[in-house]
Image (spheres, rainbow, N blue to C red):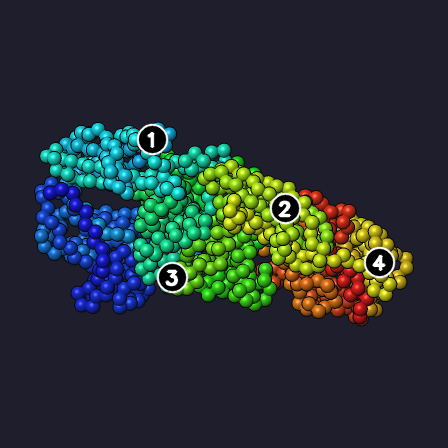
Amino acid sequence: MTYQCLVLGGNWQLAPHREQLKTDPHEVPVPGLVDCAQPPISWQEHDFIWYKTSFECPQIAQNQHVFLQLEQVQFGAQVWLNGQLIGEDIPCYTSQWYDLTTHLNDNNQNILLVRVGQKHTLPEHSAVGNDQEKLAWIPGIWGEVKLHIYGAGRIPWMRIIPDINTGKIHVTTEIEKLSDKTSNFQLQLRIREKSSGRYLAESRNADVTLQGAEIVESHFEIKIPDFQLWTLENPFLYDLEASLRHSAGTLSHKKSVPFGMRAFEIKDGHFYLNGERKVLLGSNIAFHRLLADKQRGNLPWDEAWIKRALVEIPKENNLFFFRIHIGHACNKWYDFADEHGILLEDEWAFWPSSGSKEQTELEFRAWIRENGHHPSIVIWNALNESSDAAITEEIIPRMKKLDPTRPWQHIDFNEDHPYIYSLGPVLNGNKFGYSRSIFELEKSETPSMVNEYKWWWLDYAGNPSQLTEMVAERWLGRQPSREQLLQHQVFLTRELGELWRRLDLDAIMPFVYLSAGEGATANWFFDPLEELKPKPVLQALKNTFSPLGLSIELWDRHFLAGEKRDLRLFLFNDSDQAETVHLQLFFDGHPENIIFEENFQLHRGEHKILPVAVPFPTRIGTYQLCAQLSDEQQQFIADSLKIVHVIASNRTPAGASFPTLAIADPDSEISDYLNAKKLPFVEFPAESENWETVLLVGEGVWKIEKRTREKLTKFVASGGTLIVQEPELGVTLEKHLRLLDDLKIKLEFREEKEMGGYDSYIFIEDPAHELWHGIAPEYLKLFNGALGGEIVSQHHVLPNRDFITHARCGLSLCIPAVMEVKYGKGRVLISRLQMRGRLLDTNSGKGLYERRFDPVAERYFHNLLRWSRGK
């Protein structure tokens, strides 16, 4: 009898207790999870769940052996056959093997029981891993179950290393003898096209003699004539077919492993696919979080659904690379990626690591051995946002010997998770959370991979997830509408995706394409999950990740009517061939008024930077500056949009609107501004005390002597106005400032390394208040210049008396940005909105992140002065 493989799929019986399998069983599909049982079972209430099926096995000859393979089962398995305990094991992501040979009923029904456990029943040394955002750890047999009938030996493993330079494959095979007797085997390898079945090449026959129960390796080199590369556009697959025959000529084992002729490597600090640089554009699939989705059902095992989710929708939207996040997925997903040209980073379920070093290495070895043939897998990743010296310094170096063809994250390069413009500030100039600064990312000597960013997760209905609620208010204000939330997700997708492409990063992967829709990070689909209805974010990615793409480099939003500004346009050709594109630059609604127009020939892989002088509109209003690419037939390819507010020049305050002003301004910037505008003021303190308003700026606040403070206290208590502008300037730790006799301000730098940071979006409490005259709410989103358009610094500024909040910012809008303290007959205004470097046009910086004139900052300053005259 020759080798056979039987798949034991379909519906199995299930029960929480072994005895119930006889009296009151449920039905459950295999592969699947226990929550798919019918009728439903309260699986959470039981430490163990029992599966049952039966099968007939062909008559087994004396030298044959029958092995059960559980491809993937969680959490731990105990196997019984015909009432006899066969064994138990704990791997959850790789195969478990059991020798059934001596317990079979030949030509009769065999009763197979598999007991699975809850996660907490696993022993401490288990490498199952951790995920604190996973909704539930549901047990079950989630991979295929196979019955292998071998002869006297088998081939446990074949390693295939393609060499696209020579057209050869280098093959390592293991041959295992399954009995104690000396046996002679003959091994032959043949290569065929997977799609046509046509045989192309074969190896010499290798004669192998095995003494006792042992495993030996054999090595082969086979050349494929006129081979085809495995590419994203043409994922051409071959099968390596190995036939192991016993000395009597009987086929003991026939093993077929698909593979592709492709090379993936790191060179010159970038990723290369088949010798060409490849910028990896995609997202993340949190497969095991998806398994906890209440709408999941048996969708992750439905081939039509897998193809739609993993292949069709991504390719429709220019995504081709995914990190399989926190846990190896169902094996079938990798087959689809191989067949349809999707690239994968495969990540173990360590956030952080768990178990013993020995068990981890055992399971890592099985992980690499079972999956190393997949051309779709191009990167291994052992740890998410965590470290483990035993893994990175000991285990992974040994795994690299097992698979020398793929880079490992943590060893060959580092991933970054820059949750800027969301949980963090607009841009980060220093390390923030699990990410280097944007400047370090741009200059990295190893590939820069941002495989998580955009902390903006919306549930199936488009509402913020639990982790997004405090973040949403920071950027949209109180109670944003569903439409605002969805559109801001689109905005962030475009804005940050373009930023990473301008910085020429190597892998760009916003989080998260597919996960549990009700979970902390949700996914990019509306319900029902079965229909995979994309949210608008995917259409935005289609534009942002267009192989022929573009981006306007512009962070400023406030411009004077008729102003001219030199900007840069970035053009990207990440396609596999040279392309001719037509570029236009105009303000939306006015495509007939073209600012710039030209055709460009872009070489394969070329990233081009174009300096462009842009004249801004002469009419006041809000616009979008639009750069648009089209092909030679004028068909739209992609665009880049930037918000622009065109604002009238501010009139200088004069006459009755301007208070008698005394200022303390150590840096003299406001003094210089007042002099330039020919506005009178006196230095504070001054001999004359005929003031209406005292303005203390930055470090000037700290230098009030006791005698001066007494005068200032009397002045405010009698009806005067004191304005304290950015008192936190220069504070690096904590400072307590006595402003008036019984008014103190606590100034404290916030040590926020993972969330928060400075603020660039400010929300006003009363738009009708005089402070905001002529300032639309949209104008308080990014001031011109400074990194990320910073408006309010990363400090706590809190007075010791009750105050009125006129504007706020920060996560959950918990940071007061403008505060008013009533004091006797007068008042104190604490203003944190940064006007530094933004009042005088002559001081405007030319660099991208240098402060420069901002008409909104100037208007706010004028409003401060006008307001100070009121009572």
Residue plotted at (13% across, 51% down)? 57
Which residue is labeled 3 in the image?
A: 531
- Where the C terminus falls, by quadrant? bottom right
Which residue is labeled 2 in the image?
A: 596
User: Mark 3 is on which residue type?
Assistant: Glu
Tell me: 153 left or right of 561: left
Tell me: 856 left or right of 513: right
Residue plotted at (50% across, 40% down)? 579
Mark 4–mark 1 contact, CB under 8 Å?
A: no
Tell me: 797 left or right of 701: left
Say which of marks 2 and 1 sits in front: 2
Mark 3–mark 1 contact, CB under 8 Å?
A: no
Q: CA distance from mark 3 to mark 1?
A: 42 Å
Which residue is labeled 4 in the image?
A: 662
Residue plotted at (56% across, 66% down)? 480
User: Mark 2 is on which residue type?
Assistant: Phe
Residue 714, percent from left and from top: 83, 65
Q: CA distance from mark 3 to mark 2?
A: 43 Å
As drawn, 712 above or below 320:
below
Q: Which label's residue is closer to the chain start, 4 or 3?
A: 3
User: Mark 4 is on which residue type?
Assistant: Ala
Q: Which mark is residue 636?
A: none
Q: Residues within 10 Å of mark 3 (few under 14, many from 20)?
A: few
As drawn, 543 above or below 869:
above
Q: Which label's residue is closer to the chain start, 3 or 1?
A: 1
User: Mark 1 is on which residue type?
Assistant: Gly
Q: Which mark is residue 167?
A: 1
Q: Which label's residue is closer to the chain start, 4 or 1?
A: 1
